[in-house]
Amino acid sequence: MTFIALKCPHCHSELVGKHGTYNGKQRYICKNPDCPHTTFYTEYTYNACKPGVKSAIHKQAVNGSGVRAISRCLGISTDTVIAELKKKKRT
Ligand SMILES: [Zn+2]
């Protein structure tokens, strides 16, 4: 079992491991014996889904950063950056 850099939303323990998938969602298990909830799901498996990443993309684009620089800085794929910037132009 490999531990990932993720915190349990209930007890904020980092003693968390993957616990298979359910309905296509990654399921995690909290190993803190004092935690009231042992399993949970997260919406934030990918960096691109984290709140703040999208606004960070636009902020860096406004500052003149290229797609590659933004993707490297935020740890997301260039495809994600391009898709997000295209979305912004359309609206
Ligand atoms: Zn917990």
Image (cartoon, rainbow, N blue to C red):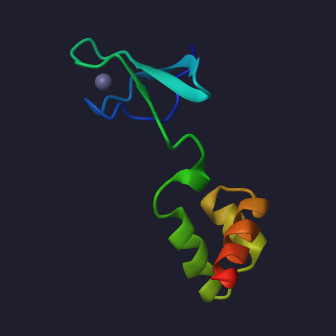
Percent position (x, y) of residue 32? Answer: 30, 17
Query: For residue 72, what is the image quadrant?
Result: bottom right
Percent position (x, y) of residue 59? Answer: 55, 80
- Which residue is pictured at 64% across the width and 65% down the height? 73
Query: For residue 83, what is the image quadrant?
Result: bottom right
Ligand 1 quadrant assignment = top left
Measured along the vertical axis of the image, is residue 44 above or below residue 60? above
Measured along the vertical axis of the image, is residue 91 above or below residue 23? below
**Quadrant of image for the C terminus:** bottom right
Q: Is residue 37 left or right of residue 42?
A: left
Toward the viewer: 76 or 54? 54
- Which residue is pictured at 56% across the width and 67% down the height? 54
Q: Is residue 63 left or right of residue 27?
A: right
- Which residue is pictured at 69% across the width and 82% down the height? 90
Q: How many marks?
A: 0
Q: Is residue 25 left or right of residue 65?
A: left
Measured along the vertical axis of the image, is residue 69 above or below residue 2? below
Q: Is residue 13 left or right of residue 71?
A: left
Measured along the vertical axis of the image, is residue 68 above or below residue 2? below
- Which residue is pictured at 61% across the width and 61% down the height? 74
**Quadrant of image for the N terminus:** top right
